[in-house]
Image: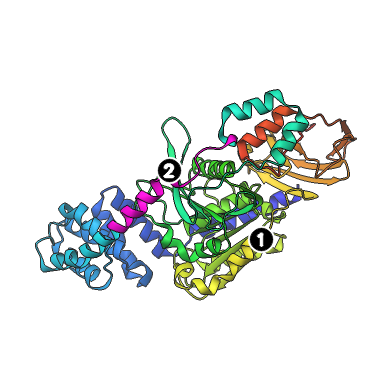
Amino acid sequence: MKFLASFWLVIISITSAYAQIDSVSVYHNRAFEHYNRKDYAGCLFWSKKMFQTNQSDYRNNYNLYRVAISACQVNQPAEAMAYFTELVDEHLHYSMYYNFASDSILLTCVRDAEIWKKAIANTKPGYDSAETANELYYEGIMDTTRRLNHSPLLSEQYLANLFTTKSFDKIYQTLKNYHQYETPPVSGHWTLYNIRMNDTLTVPFLVYIPKAYKPGQKTPLYLFLQGAVRGRKQFMVRGNIPVYDSPVLYKAIEKGAFIIYPFARTDVNWLYHPIAFQAILKEIAFVKSLYNIDDNRVYLAGHSNGGEGTFYFAINQPTPFASFLALNYFPQSHITNTLLINLTNNRTFYGVSARKDHIFDFRKVDSIYNYAKGIGCRWQNYSFDGDHGLAYNNSGQIAFTYDTLMSAERHPFPGTIKWETDNVNNGRCDWIEITALDTAANNHRKTGVIEAAVKGNEITIRTSAIKQFSFYVYPELVDITKPLFFVINGKAPRRIQVQKNKEHLKAAFLDTKDRTLLPVQKITIQVDE
């Protein structure tokens, strides 16, 4: 297809832009990487280059702390003392006490100085007070008696009985009109659930149960992906009260929404790890099993790395969501091609950028945004004066974006869809799914593209580099009492009679617990040469 060539050009420009990001960010990343490898000489070298750029955002407590340790470890006590003194006098936060206590052996060259005593004296009381509050909070989120833990939709026996003993129509109506939701023992609080991903990985996530929740009423669901996820060795469950993200959560709480707050760590995060995205989808399905969630009002937002994770979902797996919001982000997927064509469908992606963001250069974000608008993407980016902390430091200024985000509703039965993917695991958008790519085709990008349109019971399909696709049959989209006609790449129509299929319905529902997207049948079609 003609648009493949232009898309290849924009991918090159996006990749180049990201590779050429401001030097200070490159220096910061290199210093961080060397520190994690315990290459303290390397960390000291790159930290100095970072500080020489005079970007105030980077002269913060954690960077000063790492460079002080690095200087101490390479026998530069005077430099270590200077950096540590600046940290204590200008950037001290009580949370640093944990680092001081844990890493004191790495700071032997300053540990006997008065500045060390000052650091301990000025952080320990605040840290102890916060730890007491954290313990109370942790006890609360771990108290399983204050939430729902069981549901027929989580019961293998209930579901097995439903799908084996009932007719298709009875199953369909039971799921469509399901209402056996219970009232939680306590509402207006956070609780901690866990999702088992495999034999070695269980992922924790927080859920906020809204104060005014009524089980007979469909309720919106809001997900927030946190930033700074690359360097977390563990899931930060104990010390990560969502109050730190309250500027971007208060609107969801105000609107009476459920909130999912996923956790991430170095090897399970929404930059580089598909399993992190799979976990989020499982978390949504789990919450839908217990609580009466409105399938058409599920919203995804994130800050920094979390904004990049949000962008990933928008261009790769948008089906569960109504709309998206990314704060201080860069519009690129790290593990797939950055497929802007996928933003031309019927969901809007909202972005907020700071014009002085030294991590994600606004000029480069804006150039990609302007290109995307030129090809018809449903993407609205707002820019404001500020730095990378804009969403927290100027929350009132951008609060309108939350209202905009949560005013949208999902419309999962659009008349047309245009979709591109380089991975069939990301091949679906609403009712169309790319299920096999044509790897033998002359396709240097290794992607496949499908354009699909429904008018009455005629489905018109155009493909490029695709061997197979699936069409999900919904009564809201076509007349299931009449045959369907598929016109593929301009060839003679293929007539296919709809056949209600329990297994297809079961697979779809168990995967998503979506009571709106209930397919009567999943029709899989081979594309002729």
**Identity of the amino acid at label 1?**
Ala
The answer to which of 263 and 353 lies nearer the viewer is 263
Does the magenta stretch mainly form a helix, a strand or a loop? helix
Q: In the drawing, does residue 99 fall left or right of residue 436?
A: left
Tell whether label 1 touches label 2 (CB within 8 Å): no
Q: In x, y percent, where is residue 27? A: 36, 60
Q: Residue furthest top?
A: 164
Q: In the drawing, does residue 95 fall left or right of residue 464?
A: left
Q: In x, y percent, where is residue 371? A: 66, 63
Seen in the picture, residue 376 relative to 318 is either above or below; the reply is: below
Q: Is residue 296 magenta?
A: no
The residue beneath circle 1 is: 372
Q: Which residues are magenta?
A: 132-152
SS category of the residue bearing label 1: helix
Q: Which mark is residue 144?
A: 2
Question: Mark 1 or mark 2, which is nearer the start of the sequence?
Answer: 2
SS category of the residue bearing label 2: helix
Q: In the drawing, does residue 248 fall left or right of residue 159?
A: left
